[in-house]
Structures are given as C-alpha cells and as structure tokens.
Image: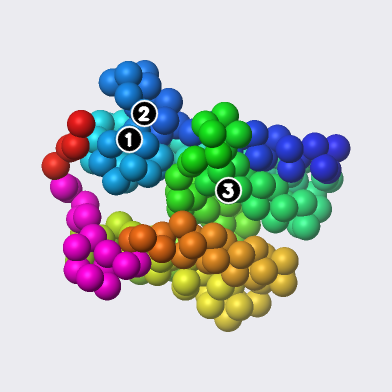
Amino acid sequence: MSLLSLVIGYLLGSVSFSCLAGRLLKGIDIRQHGSGNAGATNTMRVLGKGPGITVLLLDVIKGMSAVWIGSYLSGGSSLFEVLAGISVIVGHNWPIFFGFRGGKGIATTIGVMATLAFFPALYAGIIAILSIVLTRYVSLGSLLFTALLPIFIWFMGLPNEILVLSLLLFVFAWFKHRSNIVKLLKGNENKLGAKKQL
C-alpha cells in the first residue's frame, strides 16, 4: 500500500490542469503558446487571470493531496510522505498523460512543502512573493522559493528526509528553469502581466 501511494502520486501529478484548461477553454495545446510551459503563469498569460489562478490552486492541492495519500496508505510514514511528494512533482514535470512534457512544478512543490514543512514554506514564500511584486519576474520568485526552502528547513531543525527532499526539489526547479535563468541574466525574461499570445 505504501508503494501504491507513489504510483498514485505520479498519476495524480500527471494530470496537467494547465493543458486541460487550454483544451477545454480554447481548444489549444497551452504548450504551443506563450512561454510554452504547462503551468499557472503561462495559463494566466494565455487564457487570463481566472484560469491561471484556478490552475495554480489545483496544482497546489495536487501536491498536498499526494502527501496526504502517502501518509494514509503508509500509516503515517514520513519517508513515504516525502516519496509521495517527489512522485507527484515528477508526474507534474514529466506527465505520462501528456507526452512527458509538463510544467516546472513550482505550484505543486508549494503544495508538497506547505504540507510537510509549513513554516519554512511560508517564510520562503513571503520572500518569493515580495520579489515577484517588486520585479514582476515569476521565475525569479520561483527560484528564490526553492533556494531558500532548504536553508529555512535546516535552521528550523526539521527531519533530514524533508531537508533532502527540499534539496532535490531545488535541483528539479533550477533544471526546469534553466532557460529562464539565461533570460534573467540577459534581462529579457517575460514579466508578469505580459500580453496574451494566442
């Protein structure tokens, strides 16, 4: 049953709400428009604020649900809570239902880490949000969030498996954002509020 939670986590992660929103609302593949990413920010850019916020919330809930399922099916094992968290983010980033081309996993990471490490996620999230408000670069906020999480987790003395998870998610996020990092360095990264591109 514990191992089943990992399969469920991956399959749950593979449900791309961004791709579904594009198909249902506009009959498009969201990955062919805007930034090309199947995530909340690009959904907002292409489809509007309502769909974008809805996708964001659903992706967060997806991450939280995977951890809860991992906890329930494993009898409260912290190891399987962490592994279920990894599984759902892997599913989101490389979804079997959408040709293994998914999003960057930040909203799902927020859901996972808010469930496993609420206060570190809260503190990192506040700094990330402030950076987005000041710069309008969502990618910068996402990178800061995943970079600060391990630091807060370490300082607050949370279990080692959660620290290791945060380090792994940091690697995932920075790998998926590698093109954004180049754009940030060059000063031509897309800002929040850019016009729709259909």
Q: Is residue 133 above or below residue 86?
A: below
The residue singled out by tag 2 in the image is 29
Where residue 95 sits: x, y (%)?
56, 37
Relative horizontal placement of residue 12, taking residue 49 as reference (left or right): right
**Which residue range is magenta in the image?**
181-194
Which secondary structure, mark 2?
loop
**Crowd around label 3: few <14 · some 14–19 · many ≥20 (10 Å):** many
Confirm or deny contact between disc 3 and disc 1 (CB under 8 A).
no
Q: CA distance from mark 2 to mark 1?
A: 6 Å
Q: CA distance from mark 2 to mark 3?
A: 21 Å
Residue at 61 percent across and 65 percent down: it is 168
**What amino acid type should be assigned to the residue bearing mark 2?**
Asp
**What amino acid type should be assigned to the residue bearing mark 1?**
Gln
Residue at 80 percent across and 37 percent down: it is 4
- Circle number at residue 32: 1
The residue singled out by tag 3 in the image is 89
Q: Which quadrant of the figure contains the C terminus?
A: top left
